[in-house]
Amino acid sequence: MITVTDLSVRYETTMALEGVSFSTPAGRLLALTGASGAGKTTLLWSIAGLISPDAGTVAFEDETLGVEQVSLIPQGNALVSVLTAQENLTVPLLAAGVDPGEATERATAALERLGVEGQARQLVEQLSGGQRQRVAIARAIAARPRILLADEITSDLDARNRDLALEILRQEAERGVAVVFATHDPEAAAHCDARLHLIDGRVENPGTA
Ligand SMILES: Nc1ncnc2c1ncn2[C@@H]1O[C@H](COP(=O)(O)OP(=O)(O)OP(=O)(O)O)[C@@H](O)[C@H]1O
């Protein structure tokens, strides 16, 4: 469960979020919608603990859950371009203390789920935009998060891979993960269980998400 209470974030003169409150349980796939600049990325980064809000709180119901169990798939994927696809998955797992054998198994399985196992040994800089996006999704799920935050992850994908990415988000929710998926795509939002719509940093129809 993610509970956001009265969250406000200001960038100099811009109020990116203002009094945002909502909660979403484990197992739910929540679409986060709104026009460009509405505050979707700011909200995901705040939930991930990467931005300190000016006011308000983000809480996870399970007190034992720390930010290391939150995976964010950022816009633009943030992969390391001079590492291979496989290394982009294994390096963070090794850094988190996962045993090398298990890190390799988890990376291989995640790349297979996204259909990019054939690119495992290629450098990220040699991959297409859509392949990079799928490697970024694989990296997030290989971490086995309890909370998964996905920022516009279908924007570079063709129809088949867009459906695959949505199916992966659905499978993660079925595994008991709380998933928040920022998207401009109405069809992708319709595939989710609920929708939170932001207008200029505020929640439209508060309390209905
Ligand atoms: N680092 C920053 N410094 C100043 N203003 C910022 C910064 N990041 C975002 N903003 C502003 O905060 C507001 C919300 O931005 P945010 O990126 O959260 O929106 P978004 O809904 O994710 O947009 P998009 O759909 O285009 O990605 C916008 O007005 C944006 O210009």
Image: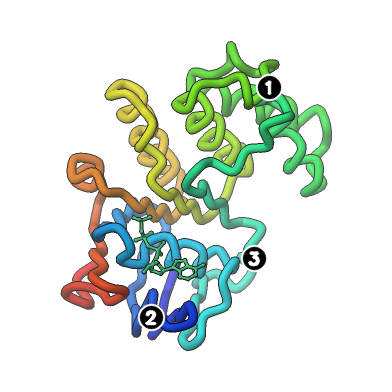
User: Which residue lies under the disc numbered 1?
Assistant: 123
Residue type (three-letter) at the residue carrying disc 2: Met
Q: Residue 196, position in %: x, y?
A: 26, 64
Q: Mark 3 or mark 1: name the one nearer the start of the chain.
A: 3
Look at 31% across and 21% down and name the residue there: 160
Q: Please state if 204 lies on the left or on the right of 148 as rendered.
A: left
Q: Which residue is mark 2?
A: 15
Residue toward you, 28 or 123: 123
Where ligand 1 lies, by image quadrant? bottom left
Which mark is nearer the camera, 2 or 3? 2
Q: Earlier in the sequence, mark 2 or mark 1?
A: 2
Residue lying at 36% horizontally and 24% vertically, measured from the top left: 161
Labels 3, 1: front one? 1
Label 1 near label 3: C-beta < 8 Å? no
Find residue 66 and name its label: 3
Residue 202 position within the rendered picture, expressed as x and y whole percent measured from the top left:
27, 76
Q: Residues within 10 Å of mark 2 (few under 14, many from 20)?
A: some
Asked if labels 3 and 2 touch by Cβ distance under 8 angstroms, the answer is no
With respect to residue 112, does 44 lie above or below?
Answer: below
Q: Earlier in the sequence, mark 2 or mark 3?
A: 2
Q: CA distance from mark 2 to mark 1?
A: 39 Å
x, y percent for residue 40:
37, 62
